[in-house]
Amino acid sequence: MKTKNDWRWQLANSVRTWDPPGVDRDLADRVLDRFPMSVTPYYLSLMRADDPGDPIHRMAFPHLDELAPSDSTVDDPIREEDHAVMPGLVRRYPDRALLLVSGDCPVHCRHCTRRNMGKGKIVPARGEGLVHALAYIEDNPEIRDVIISGGDPLVLEDRDLIDVLARVRSIPSVEIIRIGTRVPVTLPMRITESLALDIARFGPVYVNTQFNHPAEITDEALAAVGCLVDAGVPVNNQAVLLAGVNDSPEIIEDLCRALMRARVRPYYIFMCDLVRGIGHFRVSLDLGIEIMAHLRGRIGGLGIPQLVIDLPGGLGKIPVGPQYVIGHKDGKTILRAPDGTTVEYCEEKIKS
Ligand SMILES: *Cc1c(COP(=O)(O)O)cnc(C)c1O
């Protein structure tokens, strides 16, 4: 019998209708036509379901602001389409490639960077398409790091996921495999001890996930990441800074501490991309930098992620943060301590 602990039950019973009080049906449909809604019963249970101000609600339920006209946002600011070498395979860096294997996710995050995609070359590589993508990776041995993404790769059936992993692992030049998935956050019962062991067989495999708020780190999520880490699959977190969700130094501090307790290493915090339909989630870069300054000196370095901007124009990711090198004086470098104190740092080599 299928119950709420069964991931297929969760997918089958996901909420896909949106009837906000006081909103015109036509208007609501326009929002859903742009980007459909899907929320697992599990993820729904984490929020105050009738409160649009709840941070988890905000990530999962549509908002009329998604229709707001804007000159500064576009469908594909990071130009994945231009960097796709063929359908389902994006290559922006010589040593890394992004392999899209699924077009769907358990929860359609309202802040999704790929919300306007799913056409052109930003589609899953399947069947013959997957054969071609793997042949490309094999023919380009500089690619050492393959990032399996989508959509969410963990919505694939076990046998399909294992097939993809086995085929990527069989390419001798591929050193590491990463799986980009939000399943530990939105559908944690998908990850069992046996699935984790199956994934670990193709190691080194890293899982990169996206916890954005400490309330997402539930007992179920802890069990899911625990299975992965116990099996030998390191888990890293790539959060996104989102207005009304986690746009405060205290929330991010709590998140990073909770991740460390869960054995999940905070890897990146992304500034929200300039994607059409998610402008209402954007936060100022100054606040991002303030958050990073808050973390430094307050929590251990292992728990401090890098704040990253994925540059418009598809130019790649860059780290941004507070400046600790302030200037130079009399052959010395002036540095700033986390508490604001400045100190002189001698660069001279000492010789006898
Ligand atoms: C983000 C990204 C990567 C991985 O970047 P890291 O900084 O190594 O995590 C690789 N390829 C593409 C196309 C990306 O967008």
Image (tube, rainbow, N blue to C red):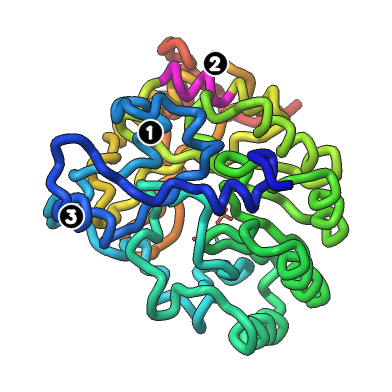
Q: Nearer the viewer, residue 173 or 231?
A: 231
Ligand 1 lies under 8 Å from the Cβ of mark 1: no
Q: Earlier in the sequence, mark 2 or mark 1?
A: 1
List the residue tagged with mark 3: 72
Question: Dots 2 and 1: beta carbons under 8 Å?
Answer: no
Q: Position of residue 69 (x, y in %)?
A: 12, 54
* Residue type, label 2: Gly
Residue in view at x 83 percent, y 61 percent: 202
Distance in Å between CA atoms under marks 2 and 1: 32 Å
Q: Position of residue 208 (x, y in %)?
A: 62, 48
Q: Earlier in the sequence, mark 3 or mark 1?
A: 1
Examine the image and state in which quarter residue 81 appears. bottom left
Determine whether 206 is above or below 320 in the image: below
**Chief secondary structure of the magenta span?**
helix
Quadrant housing the C terminus: top right
Residue in view at x 52 percent, y 24 percent: 215
List the residue tagged with mark 2: 297
**Helix or strand or loop: what does disc 3 sit on?**
loop
List the residue tagged with mark 1: 57
**Helix or strand or loop: what does disc 1 sit on?**
helix
- Which residue range is magenta in the image? 249-256
Residue in view at x 53 percent, y 19 percent: 254
351 sits to left or right of 273: right
* Residue type, label 1: His
Question: Dots 3 and 1: beta carbons under 8 Å?
Answer: no
Q: Nearer the viewer, residue 313 or 135?
A: 135
Determine whether 15 is above or below 202 in the image: above
Residue in view at x 61 percent, y 22 percent: 258
